[in-house]
Image (cartoon, grey):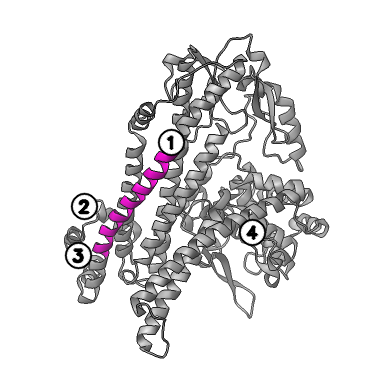
Amino acid sequence: MFEYMEDAETVSRELADIYAKASRQLNYRIDEIYDKFKDRHGLTDKEAMALLNTLKNKNDIATLKQALAGKAKTDPGYADLLAKLESQAYGARIERLEQLQTEIDRMMQEVYKQEKKITTSHYKDLAKNSYYREIYNVQRKVGFQFSFSAVDPKMINMLLNSKWSGKNYSARIWDNTKGLASDLKEQMILGMLTGKTEGEMAREIANKYAAGAFEARRLVRTESNFISGQMQMAAYDECDAEYYEYVATLDLRTSKQCQELDGKVFPVKEAVPGVNMHPMHPFCRSTTIIHLGGDVVPGLKRRARDPETGENKLVPASTNYKKWYQQNKAAIEKAEGKKKARGKSLHKKQGDGNIKVQAEEMKIENFPEAFTEKAEAKNTQALIDYVNGLKGADAKVVKLYNSMKKMESIVSQGIPFKISHGKSHAVVSSYRPSTGQLVEVKLTIPKVAAGGGAGAVNTTLHENMHLIDLYLREDLGGHGHFRGSQAAKVLDEALAKVKPDIGEKAGALFKEYKEECYRIREAAKASCMQKVEELTKQYYGEGSPNVWGDIKKYKQYEKERKKLYSLMEDEVDTMCRNAMGGGVGQLQDVYDALSGGIARDSGAVLYGHGSKYYRSMDARKAEIIANYGAMSVTRPDLIDMLKEDKPELVEALDALVEEMLKKVGD
């Protein structure tokens, strides 16, 4: 099963490339539809969505204008927007948008064809391999070879056409691509109604395609698990086996459903996916084995994850999940005991058998007013939903984020505070030069609600931790952060001791990450160069760009060429931040801070701030704290890696979080 899932991941990456390519193609075509800068004539996201929800066809421009006309009779804002859309200058944009809506349908039909072709080939190979592999496994278990029938191609075709969960795989692909096309067209209409800029729309489109790629991956993983299971049953039937045994993965990620089924025996003829055989749920990792009786089982082995070392090991095949859990209680307790620092532990033994300290549920009412009003509430709720869906998040760090309303000390002090969304993510504080008084704070974060994935969530948590650092300053009216207080001296002491070298595991991870980002960049670059070539032909045929010829023509060509490169860089950055589960770039930035920026300057890490920024020890502390906060929530495994390499640093950061909670009163 592990080998098959690796194959499924390979196919998923291939599909992700197809979706990314489609995203690039669409982004190249939105030129001259949206403004370069924010337009004053625009509805809020809520108003625009409410208007579209009144229409039977949300993508029909004519119907939309009729609805606007009705609203314009009583609301001047709608009248201004309608006048803009009906103006002669805007006519070309509307026409281009309508053409692009048709192009989206054609583009997604092509994505559907490619995805179906790739997955069909994968599923057919998987079906044959699963069948023959299971026949081999049975022969190995019984200790002798026997004759068996070859896999029937007709049976594979029937399997691919089966509607085991309501629809077959082809229909599911179509639903995904068709749904994505509809979402894209709706998003483009919303962009026009709300006055989104060209850059904002490019990011919205990229996020929609990223969501589509994730759905494609979920489908491939789950469908692969189903096909593998069905061919296992076919192999058991060929061997005249009457019973099979359910086999879950022995680690701490296994779902409750699969934990309960592990080791149970069922008749082959009564196997039903989602009831007593895999897949029990999306991304299911369970499988089955033939059940040959108690006299054979003791000699067999199965794979399990060592809770202390994280390495795979073999245990008796008779060990089910409950038995494995009971046998490893001591190892789990020992492993987590090593991770405790100043009484802080992500895991600890519980009386009910659940070994994780569950983080409290994040709630929107625990955020300051600026995060919950008007359009920002949707983005805040998207962040909350993402975090609440995570497993293993550090409970105390989550509590700190969940206490932001309690600690808010900017608006409550009469200081203006604004949240915006753009490329340059940061917390910017402005001070009056003569007195050093804090006069304004601006927070710029990604739009998590737009589907930016792990990268957007990590960046938002990172910047929110910067804001928490500012909220907890000692001088509420002037300069300062919590990191400069006496309570934060523990971090200063740790940084004075910690060596800046990159540990072996982190080094190996960064090497793999660098290769992945290189692959992402090369793919994006190749596509971009193709677009530049097409652009050049469009302007100059088979000739070369001529700066000495038509100057106006050359300037327009250069403008569009630079835009292609800019879009490529944005896409590469987004995909790299999401690569390998997200958060790797933030771990790199921690090591860059420890090195004073040398790691980034030397190329040892891809993401970091460099030596110019990290000349200041205060800047190093600020970024280490912010990166630690984000990773503790989304990637506790990376914190574990950092702790193994720099235990005194993580111990100090754990203590720092406790001091922050004490100041808040939690």
- Quadrant housing residue 71: bottom left
Q: Type of residue at label 4?
A: Asp
What whole-number distance in Å separates the C-alpha atoms at marks 4 and 1? 51 Å
Disc on the earlier residue, 4 or 2: 2
- Report the residue marked by disc 2: 55
What whole-number distance in Å separates the C-alpha atoms at marks 3 and 1? 54 Å
What whole-number distance in Å separates the C-alpha atoms at marks 2 and 1? 40 Å
Q: Which residues are magenta?
A: 97-123
Judge from the rendering whether residue 178 lies leftward or rightward of residue 156; answer left or right. Answer: left
- How many other residues sit within 10 Å of disc 4, few (<14), some (14-19) or many (≥20)? some
- Report the residue marked by disc 4: 469
Residue 108 lies within the magenta run:
yes
Q: Type of residue at label 2?
A: Leu
Image location (x, y in percent) of residue 637: 65, 44
Point out the image quarter for the N terminus.
top right
Give SS at disc 3: helix
What whole-number distance in Å separates the C-alpha atoms at marks 4 and 2? 46 Å
Is the stretch drawn in magenta largely helix, strand or loop? helix
Residue 123 is tagged as 1
What whole-number distance in Å separates the C-alpha atoms at marks 4 and 3? 46 Å
